[in-house]
Image (cartoon, rainbow, N blue to C red):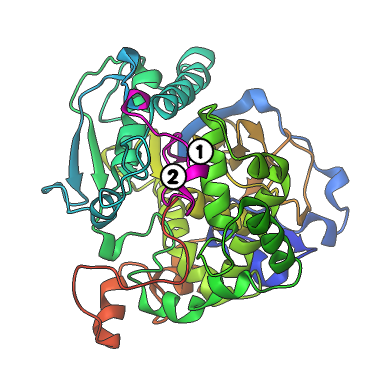
Amino acid sequence: MISRVFKLRMWAPVGVLTSLTYCLHQRRVALAEPGGADQQNPVDRNLLELKMVQVVFRHGARSPLKPLPQEDQQVEWKSQLLEVPPQTQLEYTVTNLAGGPKPHSPFDSQYHETTLKGGMFAGQLTKVGMEQMFALGERLRKNYVEDIPFLSPTFNPLEVFIRSTNIYRNLESTRCLLAGLFQRQKEGPIVIHTDEASSEVLYPNYQYCWNLQKRTRGRRQAASLQPGISEDLKKVKEGMGIASSDEVDFLVLLDNMAAEQVHSLPSCPTLKRFAWMIEQRAVDTALYILQWEDREGLQMAVGPFLHILESNLLKVVDPATPPSKTRKLYLYAAHDVTLMPLLMTLGIFDHKWPPFAVDLTMELYQHRESKEWFVQLYYRGKVRPLGYGWEVAGPPGPPGLAPSHLLGPRESPLVHELSGSSHGCGPGIRQNWVRSGRLGLEPCPSSATEPF
């Protein structure tokens, strides 16, 4: 049973959201007990054995999703940017979650309706993005094949589970990561699992989760009217000659600016001049859409995915779980709009937009002697203690490791609330559509954000 160890310091409504925090083996509240934490022995990291790794990553660099309105301020996105680096080539198969045929991708169909200046489609993974993902794979190889002999040096389907959103740039990003991680060597077929858009949980499903859409309707437009954001947006649009009536907000500006910068393309001078402000205001806009104090909205946005990550941990810790039901490595190809609420609920969001090819990595360890379990979080390759907004009570241990005992899913009302409540958007996303009378396979218009 988990005993609460983290004391909320900054944002209670969000902090208590995450079922994953419950699952991260929290210690008994040592400071509240006689003797306190000082009388407990520190943890020797040499006695910790790595048992599982989960990596949630954003796809690599891509073309913009929506071009700027003025053609003279649009850069040319030429087909040469799509060249596939030979070291990233690797065969893979895409299936649905049950192992059946790959579902239809409505997002890819939408992207192909937008041709950018230069000929590329919107949202296409580029050579730069492929190289970024290959480099991430090589870093994971160094960590889990070379420095620690945890994974086999060649891909083994019994060791690795792969899931991606059903968007081509994410599938291709996963291919490149695997090519770097296993140096294009495999012992069996590589299968990437994906889900239909109508039930996808690897990003906040604003377009198919009717309950989430109702809560967030109008927030994106309202964000641009907030004090500070409104004045800054007007300043940037006037500097770029964009009419006030054009539907361009800081999310669109950042999307174009970030894509142009990472590809070393000649950006509009105004974008360069206001680069820092554009990123900060885009973060402010996203936070306004998510709204830290909207507990139920955040539960619907990220709770179902947190439940998946938690379930993976619980299976490994449960001694009754057959080895065939777990993997050493779980890979999840997601988006920036996935990572932001994840980072928020874990208390490690740094108020910077998650860049292309960024990763959130979760390591699970077991103490060889005490058999206690520990979790360590990494973001952007650096150890992140579990929550800038949390106070951890317990004995000293290796930096960043969160120790404790597990709470089973039925013992935590929060876990139950995240995974199966009537207002949630987990496995019952399609039921939300039935209850609201919105049936069909095409996404409804959304005022929030699509997967970036």
Q: Is residue 46 above or below residue 125?
A: above
Confirm or deny contact between disc 1 and disc 2 (CB under 8 A). yes
The amino acid beneath tag 2 is Pro
Q: Which mark is residue 229?
A: none
Give the residue number, with chain letter if any, for mark 2.
Answer: 64
The residue positioned 59% from the left and 75% from the top of the image is 222
Q: Which residues are magenta?
A: 56-81
Number of other residues with Cα within 10 Å of mark 2, as a class: few under 14, some 14 to 19, many 20 or more: many
Residue 52 is situated, as x and y percent measured from the top left of the image, at: 45, 35
Residue 307 coordinates in the image, percent (x, y): 44, 59
Residue 69 among magenta residues: yes
* Residue 328 in the image, given as x and y percentages of width and height: 39, 33
Q: Nearer the viewer, residue 280 or 437?
A: 280
Task: Identify the element where label 2 is drawn.
Answer: loop
Does 299 sit above or below residue 359?
A: below
Q: Is residue 444 above or below residue 91?
A: below
Residue bearing mark 1: 259
User: Where is 260 relative to 155, above or below?
Assistant: below
Where residue 39 appears, as percent x and y from the top left, is 86, 44
What secondary structure do most residues of the magenta stretch adopt? Answer: loop
Q: CA distance from mark 1 to mark 2?
A: 6 Å
Q: Residues within 10 Å of mark 1 (few under 14, many from 20)?
A: some
Can residue 360 be seen from the camera position used here?
Answer: no
In-front residue for pair 23/270: 270
Residue for point 65% across, 69% down: 292
Closer to the N terminus: mark 1 or mark 2?
2
